[in-house]
Amino acid sequence: MKSSPYLIILKRRSQRSGGFTLVELLVVIGIIALLIGILLPALGRAREASSKVACSSNMRQWATAVNMYVSENKGYLPLFGLTYAQDGPEPTLWWNTLVPYLKQEQALTGGYYGSQSDAIKKQAKIRACPSDPEYTFVGPHYGGFHYADGTVYGPFVWGRYNAADKAKGLRITQIKRFTRWIIFAETTSPYYQVYSPSSWIFNTDTDKDGIADTFSYYAGWNNYNGGRPKVHRGTSNVAFADGHVENLAMKVWLTDLSYWVR
């Protein structure tokens, strides 16, 4: 019995319905690629926004620790270090002074920065920035030697250059711009600090994007200043003496010097 033309057409359609033609597959692949192209940047921005918030939280913890220290030490801010270089054990450095307020253990080792590597690894969750955890850390605004002439450009100062000097920290009452003075910023390394851009103008482009982002003082040592003012899409987080945290654009970070004077 011969099949009718109608049944033959239905049969052919049913055979085609089992798969896509090459053209249809190409159209589907093109649509998927277009959607990925649209969604990936949005996902990247969302991921960076999340990292910026986590970084801000880390910085706020350190700023809170500073204020807890101040309340327990007659209004004095913590020193960058009680002693300088090999003159004393490293537990005198600022991060060892503050970690007990963050429920972490001090690194009770002597020597200089290198001996703190294990302690820094343990502190990575609250010192490293999720946007670039290998190269961006919470670091203090450092101000030089307070004992020398009384001129202080930052809150974290060395108490003394050697054992003969009298340790002298900075009191919170000496800060006139309490809510606008930066005490922490994002740095290139856990060992570096941020100098006031008014004194240490950036002259070196460490990330090779054509914009100077740190100060090079010694030949071959590009991170003398250590600042990373553009790690969050051209911005960075900073913490102030009163404990709050803001996100500042690099241009503001470098040109509004009122953030760096007390």
Image (cartoon, rainbow, N blue to C red):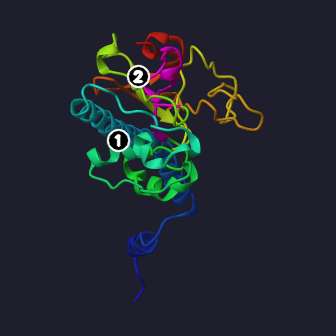
Residue 69: quarter of image: top left
**Callout 1 amino acid:** Asn
Picture coordinates of residue 204 (x, y %)? 70, 28
Which residue occupies the extreme front position in the image? 164
Query: Is residue 43 visible in the rendered structure shown here?
Result: no
- Whether residue 71 is in magenta: the answer is no
Question: How far is the residue under mark 2 from the one under mark 1?
Answer: 15 Å
Q: Is residue 72 left or right of residue 39?
A: left
In this rendering, is residue 24 above or below 101? below
- Whether residue 141 is in magenta: the answer is yes
Which portion, as a residue range, is magenta?
137-160
- Regarding mark 2 in the picture, which secondary structure is present there? strand
Picture coordinates of residue 21 (x, y %)? 53, 64
Q: Is residue 190 left or right of residue 209?
A: left
In primary-sequence order, the first of circles 2 and 1 is 1
Query: Is residue 113 visible in the rendered structure shown here?
Result: yes
Which residue occupies the extreme right position in the image? 219
Viewer-proximal residue, 257 or 13? 257
**Numbered mark located on residue 245 in the image:** none
The 10 Å Cα crowd at callout 2, few under 14, some 14 to 19, many 20 or more, is many
**Callout 2 amino acid:** Ile
Viewer-proximal residue, 15 or 244? 244
Viewer-proximal residue, 247 or 43? 247
Q: Residue at x 42, y 39 (%)?
A: 94
In which quadrant is the N terminus drawn?
bottom left
In this rendering, is residue 256 above or below 109? above
Residue assigned mark 2: 182
Residue assigned mark 1: 58
